[in-house]
Image: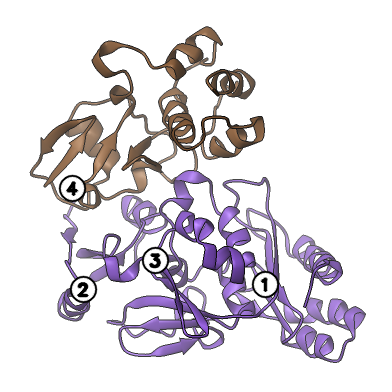
Amino acid sequence: MREVRYLRPESLAEAVQLYRTTPGCRPLAGGTDLMVMLHARTVRPEPQALLDLWSLAELKGVRRVKDMVEIGAAESYTGMIASREVQEHLPALAAAARTIGAAQIQNRGTLGGNLANASPAGDTLPVLLAYDAVVATDRRSIPIDQFFAGYRQTALQSDELITAVLFPLNRHVVFRKVGTRAAQAISKVVMALSRNPARIAIGSVAEVPLRARRAEAALERGDLEGAVAAVAEDVRPIDDVRSTAAYRHAVTQNVLRELLDSPARR
Amino acid sequence: MRFTLNGGAVSLDVVGTRRLLDVLREDLRLTGTKEGCGEGECGACSVLIDGEVVDSCLVAVGQVEGRQVTTVEGLAAGGRLTALQQAFIEHGAAQCGICTPGMLLAAHALLQQTTRPSADDVREALAGNLCRCTGYTKIIDAVLSCAK
């Protein structure tokens, strides 16, 4: 078995440099996806080196930056759950983080990893879409609705590193995940909703985390029943090991109705 | 690379992308840490890094450079069982035993954070640890008996 080299940069600048100059290099954060795939040898293309970003101070922490909340790409879900800024301004993100795996995964999972992995079932990704988050990289800012390019494909260039995620303040987003059990479940349907502006973002119902544009248009008009009807047209779920397309269609509509009924909105 | 393992200094020459789980079991011969699923689902390989519970199958060993790692072997300092370990024995909180090291470490991490957890707190803290014998009730009872 060929060894995969381990690279441990001491700074973000060194990480950026190493990522540009090392062939076959994959960034590593908490390892909750990548270490599974590495061990099963299902990482494609096969990596020659892992670039460990986990301990870089520049990628950690939750900060208030002007009228945004900035979360480091390698901050853990546990760190987000414990953060006052997240509790106060991004409660739907805290709610999503609490549904991810259990303590072991929350201590290691990161937004940078969830984004780069770009699984359609990534639990934070609909939340990011509903908040109109911005993905900051070593060279630019990418609006979240331009980030997902296809099944597990992103807008990132081959040598581009995610550094942080920025969230606007004063949004009210609600969140719901439907899985087999409360912990350690991969979503069958996962949704985040903002009433104003109208954002309906859904995971596990298409090849990418999805904005339900027809349903959003109905919600924008104040037509709640229209939104529930239209969302069935927006999603394109499949049958797989976790659920069926028919179930996901029905649950998508039910969850949207539930979130539209949820109290305490602004 | 160097790190602290169960309170003692460790210096190793290993490829940093190997799983912490494998280095613990194969290189350091600490076989108390078990491999269950190898995918971060079951928690059998739970260890503590700087006091936080993690699945050692998901950690590249290079990532523990300079950190404090605790395995189940590190709980009973000087051969004396912790109150939690004693409670597992007294409550019959082990059947086949393969989940026990991970359960102990996840529960230990909880009790370090919260001295008086509720039954729900215990269930949530152990949600990432699967018991294939489904003997959860006695495990939860054992942890609760240690709540001060």
- In this figure, which residue is indicated by the disc labeled 2? A15
Q: Which residue corresponds to the image point at 66% horizontal and 35% vertical from the top-left?
A: B120
Among the chains pictured, the one given brown colouring is B
State which chain disc 1 sits on. A
Q: What type is the residue that disc 4 sits on? A: Gly
- Residue mark closest to the camera, 2 vs 1: 2
Task: Indicate the secondary structure of the residue bearing disc 3.
Answer: loop
For the C terminus of chain A, which image quadrant?
Answer: bottom right
Are both tags, 1 and 3, on one chain? yes
Residue A202 — which label?
1
Residue that mark 4 sits on: B66
The reply to whether discs 2 and 1 touch (Cβ–Cβ < 8 Å) is: no
Q: Give the Cα distance between marks 2 and 1.
A: 33 Å
* Location of mark 3 (residue): A61
A228 or B2: nearer the viewer = B2
Secondary structure under tag 1 reads: strand
Q: Are marks 3 and 4 in contact (CB under 8 Å)?
A: no
- Viewed as shown, does residue A120 lie left or right of A255? left
